[in-house]
Amino acid sequence: MRIALRDALLTARRSPLLSVLGVITIAFSLFAFGVFGLVALNLETALEQVEERVEIRAFVTEGTDAASVAAAVARIASYPEVAAATLVTETQALEKARRELTEFADIFEGAFLPASIEVRLRPGARSPETVAAVARRLRSLTFVDDVRYGAEWLDKLYRIRTIARLAGLALGSLFAVVAAIIISATIRTAVLAREREIAIMRLVGATDGFIRLPFLIEGATKGLLGGVVALALTWGANGLIDRYLIRTVFFDVRTMLLGLLFGVAIGLAGSAVSVGRHLRRV
């Protein structure tokens, strides 16, 4: 291992330009993949924020006994799918309408709005099927006049989310394959530059494992350095977009570490494939 590390270091010193170009190529390949991942992350975050607004509103029949409604609200709040259930009285509904629809304030003067029960659902329980099931349970209550939750809007939201996830998976896989091909070609250039050295090592009895190890170390190192540079470029691009265009979120620490490991893995794989092909011809 010590000899392999020394050989990898000597190779970098002998051809610094080739090593730097290799790292830059890997960095830009991973940067393209990182930017796509950033777009997918922010799209998913935006859809989650919209999903958080999913709620069911059950309108209470006028003249219903307050104690019966309060007891029903407590039962509804105990549903496993429900995060919170709140009673909105006629007065509160009118005040809310005046506050949120200020341009129509005159219309609500002396108007009447029915009381309602606002039901907010837990994360993971906001699919169209789950929301519809809770709505059916609310409709079964004798004092509930109507139930609204925007069924068409919810269906469209989940359709968009499914399409976005499938497209993200397909395009992400494509970006990963392209990055792997580019990185493999980059490392192959380094292997070909040492073709004579590899042939001499084979003549003096060096094993394939001994020859391959320095290239694997070199590939992993280039992958790691390329991953660090790509992460820095992605962070810079995210900062510019966040400052001048729209608010964005960045990868968490776990995702960043996985990205660096991905760079190392691709570097190792590219080295292994390139060296293996060359050794079979020598």
Image (cartoon, rainbow, N blue to C red):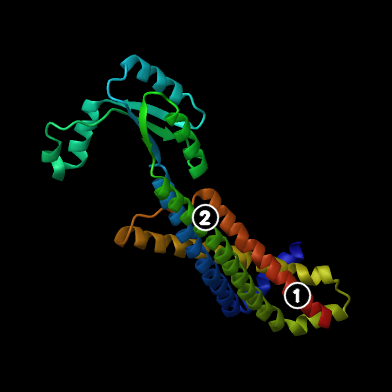
State the residue position of label 2.
162
Residue at the (48%, 44%) spot, across then down:
128
Do the numbered discs 1 and 2 sit on residues whose CB atoms are within 8 Å? no
Q: Earlier in the sequence, mark 1 or mark 2?
A: 2
> Which corner quadrant holds the N terminus?
bottom right
Q: Quadrant of residue 96?
A: top left
Q: Residue furthest top?
A: 67
Answer left or right for 243 relative to 18: left
- Regarding residue 238, the answer to whether it shows in the image is yes
Of 114 and 118, the residue lying toward us? 114
Q: Residue furthest right?
A: 205
Q: Position of residue 276 (x, y in %)?
A: 78, 74
Answer left or right for 130 relative to 10: left
State the residue position of label 1.
275
115 versus 104 height, above or below: above
Q: Position of residue 17 (x, y in %)?
A: 57, 79
262 versus 175 height, above or below: above
